[in-house]
Image (tube, rainbow, N blue to C red):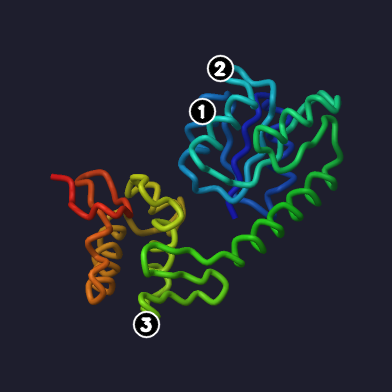
Amino acid sequence: MKLLLIEDDRHLAETIRETVQDMFETTQAFDGHEGLFLASQNIFDVIILDIMLPQMNGYEVLEQLRAQNITTPLIMLTAKDGIDDKIHGFKKGADDYLVKPFHREELLLRLEALVRRSIHDYKEQTLRFKELQMNTKTYQVTIENEILKLNGKQYDLLEYLLNNRNTILTKEQIFDRIWGFDSDTSTSVVEVYASHLRKNLKKFGYDQYIKTFRGLGYMLTENGEDDD
C-alpha cells in the first residue's frame, strides 16, 4: 500500500516513515504545495497531513483535495488539541485527527482502522457508467446484463477510469497506480492495455467513451471523440 506523508518536520517525518515501513511504501512532501501536487495524483491509499506547513497549511491542502473529489482517507496531525480545531478539520473532510506527541502504536492502530474501513466501503460499491456496472466486491463487470470478461490489469484500468470519470488521467498516473513506481516495465504498457480494454468494450459500443489525449493520457467521458 502507498502512503503520502506531508510533514515539514524532517525528524518527525523520518520517525513516521520508519514506524509505518512494514505497512506502507511512503512518499514524503515537506510543504503544502508539494503535498497538494502529490496528493492530487490520486495514487495513494492513505495520507498523513500536518496542519502547520509552509506554503499552504494543512486545512487549505485538505480543502482543495476534497474540492477535486479526491477522497483518499486522511489523518491530520497537529500540536493543537482544542475541540474547535478538530471540528474544523473534520468539516474540511479529514477522516481522523492525531495530536502530537503521539505513541507509534496509536498511529499504527489508527492507520490500520482507517485502511480497513476504506477497503470495506470500497468493496461495497457498485460503479456505474451508462449501462455498464462494475461490482468491486465480486470483480464482475456487466454491460446491459451481459458479462464483460477482463484480465486483471484491464479491470484495474477500467476501475481507475470509472472512479475518475471526466478527468484526464495521464499515462504516468495510470502507470503509478496500477503497475507501481518500482515496476520494471515502462509507461508504454498503459497504451497496450488501453488498446486491449477498448477492444473488449467495442462489442458493446463502449470503446468510444475512452477518450485519448495524445501524448498525455485518457479520460472516461460520455463525449467519445478523441483529442487531435
Tag 1 near tag 3, CB within 8 Å: no
Q: Quadrant of the C terminus?
A: top left
As shown in the figure, which amino acid type bears the numbered disc 1? Answer: Glu
In the picture, residue 154 is in which quadrant? Answer: bottom left
Q: Estimate the spatial distance between the alpha carbons at disc 1 and disc 2, rounded to whole Å.
A: 9 Å
Q: Compare marks 2 and 3 and give the one earlier in the sequence.
A: 2
- Residue at mark 3: 146
Tag 1 near tag 2, CB within 8 Å: yes
Q: Residue, x 60% and y 66% (percent of image)?
A: 123
Q: Residue, x 43% and y 74% (percent of image)?
A: 141
Q: Estimate the spatial distance between the alpha carbons at disc 1 and disc 3, rounded to whole Å.
A: 44 Å
Q: Compare marks 1 and 3 and give the one earlier in the sequence.
A: 1
**Left or right of 210: which side holds 155?**
right
Q: Nearer the viewer, mark 1 or mark 3?
A: 3
Q: Estimate the spatial distance between the alpha carbons at disc 2 and disc 3, rounded to whole Å.
A: 51 Å
* Tag 2 secondary structure: loop
Rendered location of residue 160, percent (x, y): 43, 57
**Left or right of 148: which side holds 34?**
right
Rendered location of residue 222, percent (x, y): 29, 55
Q: Nearer the viewer, mark 2 or mark 3?
A: 3
Rendered location of residue 82, percent (x, y): 86, 25
Q: Residues within 10 Å of mark 1 (few under 14, many from 20)?
A: some
As shown in the figure, which amino acid type bears the numbered disc 3? Answer: Glu
- Residue at mark 2: 55
Q: In this view of the protein, which residue sits in the foreground, 165 or 131?
A: 131
Q: Residues within 10 Å of mark 2 (few under 14, many from 20)?
A: few
In the picture, residue 52 is in which quadrant? Answer: top right
Q: Which mark is residue 34?
A: 1
